[in-house]
Structure formats: C-alpha cells, structure tokens
Image (cartoon, rainbow, N blue to C red):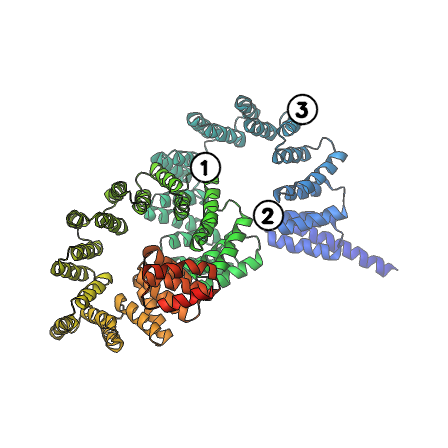
Amino acid sequence: MSAIFMACSSDAEKKVAHFEKGNAYFEKGEYKSAELEYRNAIQIDPEFVDAYARLGETYLKLGSPKDAFREYSMVAKLAPENTDAALKLATFYMLGKKNAESREKVEAVLAREPNNIEALFLLAGLHDLDKKFDAAAAVFKRIIALDANQARAYMGLARIYARQGKFDEAEKQLVQAIQLDPKEIKPRLELVRFYSSRKAFDKAQAQIEKAIQLNPDRAELYLILGNFFFQMKKNDDAERAYLKAIDIDPSDVKPYMVAAGFYDSRDMTDKALAMYDKALATKPNDVNIMTTMAGFFLKHRKVADAQGYLNKVLKERPKFFPARMMNGEIATYKKDFTGAIAIFDQLIKEEPRSARAYYLKGVAHMGNGELQSAKTSLSKTVELNPKQPKAKMLLADIAMRERDFNNAQKLSEAVLDEDPKNYQARMMLGNAFMAQGKTGEAEIAYKLLIAEDPENPAGYYRLGLLQRATKNYPAAMENFNAALDLNPKLMDVFTNLILVYGAQKEFDAALNRCDAQIKKVGDANVPKAIISNLKGGILLAQKRVDAAKNAFEAAIQLNPEFMPPYYALARIYLTEKQPEKAIEQYTAILEKNPNQAGPHMLLGTIYDMQHQYDMSEKHYRAALKINPQFAPAANNLAYLLSTRNGNLDEALKFAQIAKEKLPDDPSVMDTLGWIYYQKGLYGNAVQEFQDSLEKLPDNATVNFHLGAALFKKGDKSQAKPYLEKSLALNNQFEEAGEARRMLSEI
C-alpha cells in the first residue's frame, strides 16, 4: 500500500516539476521548450487544467491559433467555470466570424460575473459586428461606469459614434481617453486615425508630434510619423523620420526594414539594399529578414540572389512556410510551372486556408495553360479572401478567354466596388463591355481611365480601338496620337493609327507620318523596323512595288528577327511570278557572304509559299546553323515540322526557342499552339491561340486553330463561332475543309 502511495506522490511531483520548468522556459521566451514541458506534465495528468491553459498561451506565442484553440477547448471541457478559457474561446469564435458561438460563451461568463470587463468588451465587439451600434455604445458606457479609467472603452465608444456619423461625440471620447494618461500612445494614435479619416491632416500630424514630444525615445513613433508623411507624399520628411527612428534605437531591426521598404517603393534600390543589409547585420540569423530580402531580389529579377537567401533560411528552418512559398514563386518565374504547382500543393496540404498558396497555384496553372485548374484555385482564393483583387482579375481574364464576357464584367465590377481607382479592373470592364457590343458603356470606362491617369497611354489606346471599330476615325486618330505623344515607341498604337489612315485611303499622309515617327523613335531599331514594314504595306497599296521592296528590306536590315517583312517580300516575288529571280538574287548574296541567316530565311519563306517544303526546311536549318537562336527560322521550321508529319518533339524545341525570343509575336504563339494541338495538349493550345487571336483577330488560320482546339477539348459550342469566322474570312484557306467537317458535327 505504501508503494502505491509513493508512486502517486512521485507522479505528482514530476507533474509539478515539468509544469514549473515550462513556466520558466515561457518567461524566457523559449516557447518550444515550454511546449514540451507542458506536454510532459499533461502526459502524467491528462486532466491538468493549468497545463492546458499555459499550453494554449504558448501556442499563441508560437503563432499557432489552431493549436491554442484546441488547448483552451480542453480547459473549458475540464473546467467549465474557467472564465479565462471561456473568453479566449469566445475571442477565437469571434475572429472566425462564428458570432453565435462567441456570444454563447460571453453570455455564460456574464451570467456568472455580470461586471466582468473583458466579457463586456467582447459583447460590445459582437454588437458592433452585428451592426447593433446603440447596443454596443450602451455596453461601452457600462464599462466606463464600472471603471472610468478604461481607455479602450472610450476608444470603442468613439468608433461607434464615428460609424453613426456622430463625429463631434467621437472626438470628445478620444480626447477623454488621452486625458487619462497623456503619455499613453494608443489613444493618441486612435485620434490620429480619426483625424486622417476626416482628412484633418494638420490635426493628425500635430497629434503624432505631440506623442513624440511626450515620448522622445520611442522609435516607433518616428516610424508612424514617417508613414504619415509618406502617405502625404512628403518623401523627404518621411525619410528624415525613418532615419531618426534608426538613430534612436540602432539595435531594433524594424526601422531598417521600414526604411528599406520606403526606398524600394521609390526605386532607390541601392539604399533599400543597404538598409536590408544593416537589418541583417543586427540580427544575422533572422529568417524573416532573409525571406524579405529574397522577396526584394525576386522583385528585381535577381533570382540567384533570392534563391541564395532562401537556401539559408531553409537550412535554418526547413519547414519555414513563407520561404517555401517563395520557392514556389521562383519556380513560377523560371516557368517551371509543374514544379511550382507541386510546391503549392504541399503548402495547401499543410495549411488548407492559405489564400496566397491557392492564388500562386492558380497563377502557375495559368502559366501551364490549365485554365480550368487555374479557375478552381483562383475561385478558392476568393472564397478564402473575398477582397483579393488579383485573383478576381485573373478570373476575369479567364472569363474573357472563354468568351464569358458577362462574368468578366461582374468580376471587374466587384473589384471596382472595393477599389474604385483600380486601373486594371476599369480596363477589363471596358474590354468586357466592348466584347459584348456595349460601346457606350465601354466608352465611359475608357474615358474614366483617361480621367484617372491622363499620363497613361493605355486609356487613349483602348478608346482609340473602340472608335476605330465603330469607324469614328477622326476621334480614333486623336486618341492614338494622344497615346503616342506620351510614348512614341508604342508600336501597337502606331500600327492602328496607320490602319486608320489606310481605311480612309490617306496613303500619302500615312507615309509622311511614318517618316516623322522614324525620327521620333531615334536610334531604336525595333520600332523603326515596324514602321518600315508599315511603309512597305502603304507603298504596296499605292502599287509602288519597288519602293515597297526597299521598305521591307530596310525593315529586315533594322531587325532581322522581325518576321512580317520576310513574308511580304516573298508574297511580292510570287505575285510578280518571278520567284526564280528572287531565288537567284538571294543565292548570289549567300555566295558572296554565306554566313548570313537573313537570306536563308527569305529563301525558306519563298520555298514554303511554293510548297517546296524540302527546300524551305533546308534553308531554315541553314539559318539556324548560322544562328541557333534565330527566332524567325525557328518558328517557321517548327510549324513546318508540325504540319508535314515531322518530329513533334523537335518542332516543340524550335517553337520554344522562338517563343523565348519573341514572346509577344502572334505567329509564334500560333505555331506553339499548333504543336500543342498536335501533341493533344488542347488546354495549352487554346491559351496560345487566344493570345495570338488578340493580335490577329481577322486571320482565318488562327481562328480555325482556336476553333479546332476548343472542338477537340470538348467545348464545341465555344468552337463554333471561331470555325464560322475562319470560313467567313477565307473559305479557301488550307484547312477550310476541316473547318466545315467540324462544323457539320456541331
């Protein structure tokens, strides 16, 4: 009997010993060690209420609210009268928007302790969430009646009055809170926020400066002052405030990090990096600083530096969630979309409510051309974070691609409801209206873009496109010219301007404008090549064939990677029925200097148009032997191989070379899409064809390709309009028969 008693006594002593060791670790901030000791105590006594309570506090310190909730739930189960645990659970429920469960816990406490201040604060908060403002105000007044020194109650009452529009009353309550202890920072900062919300910025600044006067050694107050100046666009004052915070407490990393963010926002990258380096020198093994620095380098496309810092972080903390998230971002940046998706899948498995992981996974799926999977991930993002505008805008983009213009409109409007100044959302809304034929609404959207940011050429360009489509040519020209005045090198805009001249048969004016624009772009050969190519087209329309040839040849000389002039020259030679003369001419050029990719490209294009595919392949390969990265030849060879029963893997290799060099070229998009189509990757194909069609809306082949990919993907109703349009544009193009066959099956 005595042995049993001794064993029990020993267990009780061990339990207490573990508990006290846990408390000692907790006080020193060693929370993982504290967790272990509390767990050991609970293992000895599974009904040790105090250990569960302390373990709950430990998990809060470790940033694990889910585990804390579990431990407080055990306290409530074992000791239903434990007020602290009940209130902690009520707080968790309220934060989780489970107001009914929270209210039940609060009311149970108040039934036992009607004057419990913390319970009353929670009750006031619940009334506020339910928009029962009078009830919330009554509770705050009750708290003040119980304890007139409760500054939080005055601040809470001020917030209620402000929501009710009783601004004078709100201000009085905040002043009362400050008078309780003028040196206390929180009430004064609440008054700063109140004045800022009322646009009383001078009063807000005065309160911050008063707080600094009363607490001159508090570095965080200078950070608040700096942030205030930054919001007021007083950047020099903001910088001085941030540097003063550093002077006051050089051992605190936060001022360095805030200053670094400030410099980065102003594109002062060297100063930003210097601040990050100082922060890291202060805390050399801080994983948060290193992860932030990795993000800084990734933003500035220094991927190797970003990866270096992430590797250091993950060596210290292999499971550190933010660093692993950024690894996924780097994989996406490197276009390793499959690898990125695998990373995000693992993170979501560990943290199913991570909206950011779902968002980044959606981005990676879009990169992979997996629009349905992207839609699923992005929709989950919005479910978890309804105010996530980027996810909504990507969903709107997908809706536009799927021709669900009404949904694109709704998503854009939802973003604008939250942020009326969101430029991207306003642009998308205008595009959705335009696609639906709602020209009046589209015009209003584009004019709002111009009003919101008159220095951004995009609004003028989109409005010009709308006016060109409705044949309001004078207005279209005015807006295209406005965009070009802001940026003369916008060749999409300039091309549309020249098309407007052409539609009005104003060919001489178009040529004069081309010559003027060449002078405006200076030494920039890429835009000069585009302008020379446009000149060639105008000259052809005037039947000035020799002058057109010179313009196209000049375009090739200016930018050998630019494909349209090769096709234009080849078409001229075929139209003149003198391809042999052209072949002799370019063969002679190669005999004089064989190390030129351009003449091989032109010869390949001529043979291609003559359907002499063996010869065209020979010259494309010769061009690539001279220059393995020569995108025009890589693109044409890829398309040739994909359509002439060639090696699809080799075709894909060449298409990817072209895509890397010419990512925005619609012909390259079409080629890559066709290879995906041949390989049965219809989702990837659809994405490439859609991107190509944005730039070539009246190309019969691209319309057919998109229709065919949608048809094979099973989206036959969506395929139909593209197949029909391909035949309407040209009922004799090469795949016209296949288009008719598919339409007959729909």
Which residue is labeled 3 in the image? Answer: 145
Disc 3 residue crowd, few under 14, some 14–19, many 20+, Cα 10 Å: few
Q: Quadrant of residue 45?
A: bottom right
Of the image marks 1 and 2, the number of the one nearer the N terminus: 2
Residue 498 spot, x, y in % from top left: 22, 50
Q: Give the vertical position of 651 relative to 123 (above or below).
A: below
Q: The disc labelled 2 sits on which kind of residue? A: Lys
Q: Give the vertical position of 193 relative to 345 (above or below).
A: above
Residue 612 in view here: yes
Which residue is labeled 1 in the image? Answer: 219
Q: The disc labelled 1 sits on which kind of residue? A: Ala
Query: Is mark 1 in CB contact (under 8 Å) with mark 3?
Result: no
- For label 2, the SS is helix
Q: Quadrant of the N terminus?
A: bottom right
Q: Residue at x 72, y 50 (%)?
A: 74
> Viewer-proximal residue, 644 or 683?
644
Disc 2 residue crowd, few under 14, some 14–19, many 20+, Cα 10 Å: some
- For label 3, the SS is helix
Q: Give the numbered dot on residue 61.
A: 2
Of the image marks 2 and 3, the number of the one nearer the N terminus: 2
Residue 327 in view here: no
Q: Is residue 720 left or right of residue 646?
A: right
Q: Quadrant of residue 96?
A: top right
Q: Give the numbered dot on residue 324.
A: none
Q: CA distance from mark 2 to mark 3?
A: 33 Å
Q: CA distance from mark 1 to mark 2?
A: 24 Å
Query: Is mark 1 in CB contact (under 8 Å) with mark 2?
Result: no
Q: CA distance from mark 1 to mark 3?
A: 35 Å
